[in-house]
Amino acid sequence: MTDLARWLHQVFVEQFDFWILLGFVAQSLFMMRFVVQWIASERVGRSIVPVAFWFFSLGGGFLLLIYAIQRQDPVFIAGQGLGLVIYVRNLWLILREKRQSFG
């Protein structure tokens, strides 16, 4: 087995556990926000950010924060923690705008 094959086996097979699975689920949710944004923008022919983008950001960011805390990664914890504040704020602004438009 080559060094690369040994490394890949150790990283993706030997250490696989619940936390790795949670990390992959979280990263998949986080990635979906870009897919949603891309599809929505293609449909209208301009760049837009749909509400689903922020919900996927919130869900993926929250799970990634849990993963980062379990892994004890301070950079990842700080990055995801700040991101969650931004996602919640954007959802709050969207909700406030919808309330105002319905009077």
Image: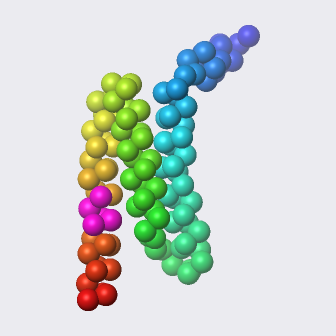
The image position of residue 55, as x and y in percent, is: 42, 59
Q: Is residue 48 above or below residue 32?
A: below
**Quadrant assignment, res 88:** bottom left
Residue visible at 49% across and 58% down in the picture:
33
The image position of residue 47, as x and y in percent, is: 48, 74
Indicate the quadrant containing the C terminus: top left, top right, bottom left or bottom right: bottom left
Indicate the quadrant containing the N terminus: top left, top right, bottom left or bottom right: top right
The answer to which of 58 and 12 lies nearer the viewer is 58
- Judge whether residue 33 can be spotted in this image: yes
Residue visible at 59% across and 68% down in the picture:
39
Q: Which residues are magenta?
A: 88-92
Q: Is residue 27 magenta?
A: no
- Does the magenta stretch mainly form a helix, a strand or a loop? helix
Residue visible at 47% across and 64% down in the picture:
52
Q: Is residue 44 above or below residue 92?
A: below
**Quadrant assignment, res 102:** bottom left
The image position of residue 74, as x and y in percent, is: 29, 30
Residue visible at 50% across and 34% down in the picture:
22
Q: Does residue 11 appear to the left or right of 47 in the view shown?
A: right
The answer to which of 81 and 45 lies nearer the viewer is 81
